Amino acid sequence: MLHTFKQLIKRLICALLYYSGLLFLFKKWVMRGKAVVLMYHRVIPETPGLKTYSHKGIIVDEKSFEKQLDFLKRHFQVLSAPEFVKSLHRKIPFEKPSCLISFDDGWIDNHDHAYTQLKKRNIPAIIFLPTDYMGTGKLFWQERLCNTMHILCKDLAQHAQLLGRMGFEMKSNDPDHEILKFVSQQKNQSPETIETLLCDLEQYMHDQNIKFPLENMDSYLNWDQVRAMDSNIIYYGSHAQSHTMLPKLSRDRQRNELSHSKTIIETETGLSIDSIAFPNGDYNQDTLSLCEECNYKVAFTTQRGHVSANDNPFMLKRVNVNNAVSASIPIFFCRVLGLL
């Protein structure tokens, strides 16, 4: 009830700021000489019978996405990735309030839904690809774990001993919340520890003859789909190879992640790749120096904020977009401007 009330108040305040014109005045001030890089992940239509195990914080429904594109086209200069990089390296302020649309992870719905809406409006975007996952049928560990936990939590009594050994507790009547909390806690673990946990769970399910449901929409682009998208609309960058948080790796392994992913994308597409988005937004000093060594021109984090001409090109900020912060155009506009 309290959450619903807060959401209603947020909607009302955003609508008041929008329809009074105050947001447009604020935009002239806060966006002077700047660009905003919007960070999308998934664009999914409402499809009965299909389920995603991705976190809600990376999902935008297709109808909302359409409205957002129309709004951006009217009120911002939407740049292609090459135009953005060129403007940034000129080291002079962006001429108009500008926007770059980016997608992390290379989900298949980037092709099936996002690209359709972008092409219809002739709006460019860049997709950051984790090359180990393209066309392989593999999933990020978060989706693998979330999927497995949802299946096991359908019969808590039967699997209580296993779940208890893992440190999972059902402290509320909301399995989705408890599972997401458990998955988030695993981010602090090493890649090897996470993989061991997943293998143990999947072996348990195999031994118990528990089947994964086939009807879900969690998969990544394959290279044919990557090549099929109009190269004047969709540009590509690296999201490393394994989608592992880079600071957890040695300098040599980071170098391999940055260099090999760049080479693979260039080989598969025939395009020059000069942009990277750090997995989970994480980086350290090794990461930053290796970006230059591997001939990237820009690198994107997940830190919130706008981009100015004098920003470090390897520490660029973005604004994440999901359904919770884009339920209406006034809310979306507040998010873009940094008010939410």
Image: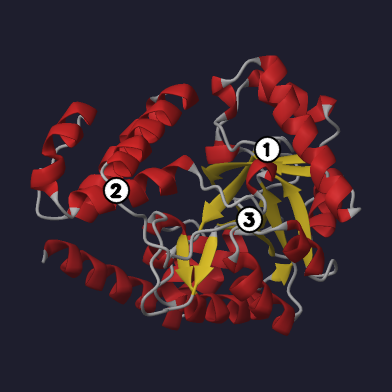
Quarter residue 222 falls in: bottom right
Q: Nearer the viewer, mark 2 or mark 3?
A: 2
| Callout 1 secondary element | loop
Q: Residue at x 49, y 59 (%)?
A: 218
Q: Nearer the viewer, residue 326 or 331?
A: 326
From this view, report whether residue 331 is shown above or below residue 272. below
Mark 1 surroundings within 10 Å by alpha-carbon count, few (fewer than 14), some (14 through 19), many (20 or more): many
Q: Hey, what amino acid is under mark 1?
A: Ala
Relative to 201, 218 lies left or right: right
Residue 168 coordinates in the image, percent (x, y): 19, 35
Residue at the (71%, 16%) spot, across then down = 252
What's the distance in space between the residues labelled 1 and 3, CA to CA? 12 Å
- Asked if marks 1 and 3 touch (Cβ < 8 Å), the reply is no
How far apart are the alpha carbons under marks 2 and 3? 32 Å
Q: Which residue is mark 3?
A: 106
Q: Position of residue 211 (x, y in %)?
A: 34, 54
Residue depicted at x 42% and y 46%? 144
Say the numbered circle drawn on residue 209.
Answer: 2
Disc 1: which residue: 240
Give above or below for 112 relative to 120.
Answer: above
> Residue 297's image quarter?
top right
Q: Circle 3 sits in a helix, a strand or a loop, which is it?
A: loop
Disc 1 from disc 2: Cα separation: 35 Å
Residue mark closest to the camera, 1 vs 2: 2
Q: Nearer the viewer, residue 312 or 80?
A: 80
